[in-house]
């Protein structure tokens, strides 16, 4: 699978609303022309991973313009629209909402002022409180509206997402979109290095058999106050770590993980050196049994001013491809056990009884990464708000009080619930009725 990894696109209104006066527009054109040439050589892109800062001020108009460009990018790379994934960056946080919202400032302060050893508890407390949890995520409202059709919105119950993609060869690639921006823009001000917080809530990263975990996050670890703890988890539980924010392309290839910086599609033109860039990551499963591995080939493309074009970043040996391998030996799956009481336990040496239903162990959110399911999500979100409401109400997918939730959370939870209850086929039928 070929993966396009980009970050820091920074669509800034009002400049981005008119391509004739947008100084970043020519660079994006050059990037798309270069990407077209790379696709001709390497084949189609299987997934596009966007590492945040899609917008600049988190204004809805910025996301509308970005969405048009991202669709162009998908067409050029021959990537299905349902295989686009995104996480928020600090520019996807509306600081104006924070500056004018005392309740938002209070929630951020309550979490950020707690000593680090007690902060996870405080974060959980605020997220579980209905009012505080919604206030914490209000600055992400425009981002959530943009991300919902991609199944990448966030909400208080689970402020990150995870979805599965079949890598082939019996290997599951589990994508984790982590949110490094929960405390971004405190008081409406710029973030300070080392001031952000991820927490153990987001770093469970289940090391399941036959699975390679990939983490997509905007901020590199030195921007996190708990960065050392996050680093320990990533290096032992995730094979791929993809970051943005620093506007620098980096590649760390270790024996058990690959860590990449995306660079910026549109860095500030005042930055020196001014080097827009993007990554192409080719993952191929090879071998069987104990010898199975993922072969990694990384192509990092960087802007060159004179002549104006994108060129390959080279290894120290002068190669245009960075290469590595990640071992993923074949293992038996872990047993699925019914969460309820099933009678007497199995005798020693005997397998426990199989559950009557896999509902409890079925990960409905992870299954949203399946291509046909993500296509359905995309189609669902293209319907009108009233049509979406009709579908979830007709299928009984909303619980008491959920109609007052923001739409990205309301319908995101409803769709996951449909997966848990085996109702996705009925959702598909209802969507098809309402499509022109």
Image (cartoon, helix red, strand yellow):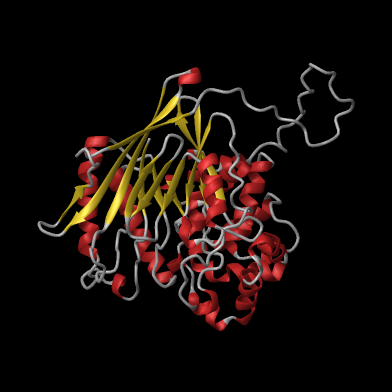
Q: Residue at x 68, y 55 (%)?
A: 393
Quadrant location, the N terminus: top left
Give x and y (percent) for residue 343: 89, 28
Task: State the residue lying farthest toward the right.
Answer: 344
Residue 355 placement, left or right of 166: right
Residue drawn at x 56%, y 58% is: 226
- Residue sitting nearer the eye, 376 or 6: 6
Please say if 225 is above or below 298: below
The number of numbered badges drawn on the structure is: 0
Which residue is rendered at x = 55% and y = 40% of the image?
237
Residue 59 as seen in the image, left or right of residue 384: left
* In the image, farthest residue toward the left: 307
Above/below status of 128 relative to 287? below
Q: Position of residue 332 (x, y in %)?
A: 61, 22
Image coordinates of residue 227 in percent, x first then y, are 52, 56
Displayed quadrant of residue 206: top right
Q: Residue at x 34, y 50 (%)?
A: 250
Residue 351 appears in the picture as rendered:
yes
The image shows residue 212, relative to residue 376, as above or below, that is above
User: Residue 296 appears at what percent x and percent y?
Assistant: 36, 34
Residue toward you, 281 or 353: 281
- Does residue 391 appear anywhere in the picture? no
């Amino acid at each position: 699978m070929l993966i396009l990894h980009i970050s820091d696109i920074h669509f800034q209104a009002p400049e981005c609303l008119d391509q004739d006066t947008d100084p970043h527009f020519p660079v994006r054109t050059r990037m798309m022309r270069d990407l077209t040439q790379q696709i001709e050589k390497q084949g189609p892109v299987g997934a596009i991973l966007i590492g945040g800062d899609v917008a600049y001020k988190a204004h809805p108009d910025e996301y509308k313009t970005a969405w048009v460009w991202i669709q162009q990018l998908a067409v050029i790379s021959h990537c299905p629209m349902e295989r686009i994934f995104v996480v928020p960056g600090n520019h996807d946080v509306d600081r104006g909402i924070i500056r004018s919202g005392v309740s938002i400032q209070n929630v951020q302060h309550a979490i950020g002022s707690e000593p680090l050893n007690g902060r996870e508890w405080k974060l959980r407390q605020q997220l579980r409180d209905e009012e505080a949890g919604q206030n914490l995520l209000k600055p992400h409202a425009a981002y959530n509206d943009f991300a919902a059709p991609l199944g990448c919105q966030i909400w208080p119950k689970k402020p990150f997402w995870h979805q599965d993609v079949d890598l082939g060869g019996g290997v599951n690639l589990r994508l984790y979109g982590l949110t490094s921006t929960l405390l971004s823009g405190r008081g409406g001000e710029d973030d300070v290095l080392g001031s952000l917080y991820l927490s153990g809530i987001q770093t469970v990263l289940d090391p399941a058999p036959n699975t390679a975990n990939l983490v997509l996050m905007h901020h590199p670890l030195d921007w996190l106050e708990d960065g050392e703890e996050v680093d320990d988890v990533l290096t032992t539980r995730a094979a791929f770590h993809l970051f943005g924010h620093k506007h620098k392309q980096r590649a760390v290839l270790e024996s058990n993980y690959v860590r990449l910086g995306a660079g910026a599609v549109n860095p500030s033109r005042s930055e020196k050196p001014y080097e827009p860039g993007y990554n192409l990551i080719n993952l191929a499963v090879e071998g069987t049994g104990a010898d199975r591995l993922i072969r990694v080939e990384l192509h990092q493309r960087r802007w060159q001013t004179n002549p104006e074009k994108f060129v390959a970043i080279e290894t120290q040996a002068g190669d245009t491809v960075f290469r590595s391998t990640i071992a993923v030996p074949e293992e038996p799956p872990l047993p699925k056990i019914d969460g309820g009481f099933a009678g007497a336990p199995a005798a020693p040496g005997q397998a426990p009884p199989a559950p009557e239903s896999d509902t409890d162990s079925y990960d409905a959110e992870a299954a949203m990464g399946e291509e046909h399911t993500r296509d359905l999500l995309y189609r669902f979100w293209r319907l009108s708000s009233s049509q979406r409401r009709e579908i979830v109400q007709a299928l009984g997918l909303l619980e008491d009080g959920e109609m007052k939730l923001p739409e990205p959370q309301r319908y995101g939870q409803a769709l996951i619930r449909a997966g848990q209850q085996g109702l996705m086929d009925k959702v598909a039928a209802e969507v098809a009725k309402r499509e022109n």
